[in-house]
Image (spheres, rainbow, N blue to C red):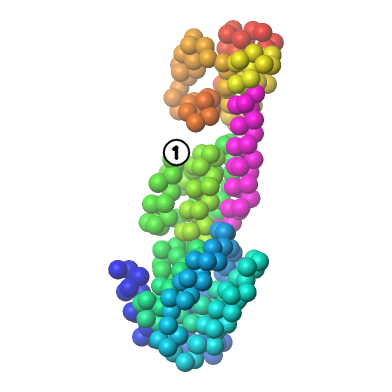
Amino acid sequence: MVEQLIAAERRSRRVCWRCGRPLTDPASINAGIGPICRRLDNRLLARLLPVDLEAATRAYHSIDPLTLDAVVVGAFETVGEALKSGQDKKDWRIEVRQVEWILSFGQTEENALALMNVVRALGYIGIVNVWLHEATTAVVRVFFKDGHLYFDAQSYWTGQKAIREISGWVWSPEEKLWSVPADQADKFFLAIASYYPNNEGLEAAVEQARAYNQNQENVAEATSAVAIGKIPLSIGSILEDFGSFLVVHAPYNSSFIEKIKALPSTDRRWNADRKEWEIMGRHRDEIMALIGTYFPEVF
């Protein structure tokens, strides 16, 4: 219903499809986009998802050229030629801009949705959601820290809904930060790329999270090897010290676990997926003492 209303409104006048404002000056009319929105091109036109050329071509051919205004047919055919010869093409920004220019003339609901599906299939999901008013163009800072991915987005209902569907999400009202565990990096990437395309640091933060995840998997494998006696137990195989927090993955010992559970609940968390404890760094001395008590062979 929202998509239908937006498409109907924009068919009645020449507008910028990002903000919905009328295009009035010659430069904006020629570009099919206003000057303020054009400044965001570098981020909004970043292709962050894989290209599905077959789906893009299918969406393109669902449009009957006879239903288009004559002034946009040339641009429409240019997009089609690019799709036909674009098997190894990586950068589709020119075609995305052409689609945006076509949209600025106002299209039928069916044609508008088909054109947006072309761009979505080419991997530019952020700009499509901006067109649909489902993504914000506000600047969002993204970073990785202590096993979690963080971002400082303002309230935006579609983005919040996507984040709340990710396992382990947390909202900190004091810091005004959302966070998710590093092992949810792929879902986090898709949510931010889709609904907060004007972000700073997404790709770098997700790469850090993936590296962290790989390291955790390596440690888990080593711990498993220790547990079955393949390699000797050592302090490095039980405890990882990241400064502000610790990761403990010792062989099972019920008394050791009870001692950890005695720590304040806000200072420790059991990661069921990785079978390890995540503990605030201020308990370093206590944890070292517990390891010395229950696993003295590591020292």
Looking at the image, is 230 positioned above or below residue 112? above
198 or 97: nearer the eye?
A: 97
Percent coordinates x, y for residue 204 in the rendering: 63, 50
Residue sitting at 60 percent across and 37 percent down? 213
- Pointer 1 local density, CA inside 10 Å: few below 14, some 14–19, many at least 20: some
Q: Quadrant of residue 26?
A: bottom right
Locate residue 136 relative to residue 143 in the image: left or right.
left
The residue at the far bottom in this view is 70
User: Quadrant location of the N terminus?
Assistant: bottom left
Which residues are the magenta region? 198-222
Residue 137 visible in the shown view: no
Q: Kindly indicate the quadrant of the structure image that contains residue 31.
A: bottom right
Where does the image place residue 276, in percent across and percent down from the top left?
53, 25
User: Which is nearer the eye, 99 or 164?
Assistant: 99
Say which quadrant the C terminus sits in: top right
Identify the main secondary structure in magenta: helix
Q: Is residue 55 visible?
A: yes
Q: Quadrant location of residue 112?
A: bottom left
In percent of width and height, residue 153 lies at 48, 54
Outermost residue toward the left? Answer: 1
288, above or below 265, in the image:
above
The residue at 51%/71% (across/down) is 57
Q: Is residue 32 magenta?
A: no
Q: Which residue is rendered at x = 49% and y = 91% of the image?
A: 71
Badge 1 amino acid: Gly
Q: Is residue 236 above or below residue 297?
A: below
Q: As rendered, which of 268 and 224 lies closer to the eye? A: 224
Judged from the image, the secondary structure of the residue bearing numbered disc 1 is loop
Image x and y of residue 94, in percent: 60, 76
Q: Which residue is mark 1?
A: 168
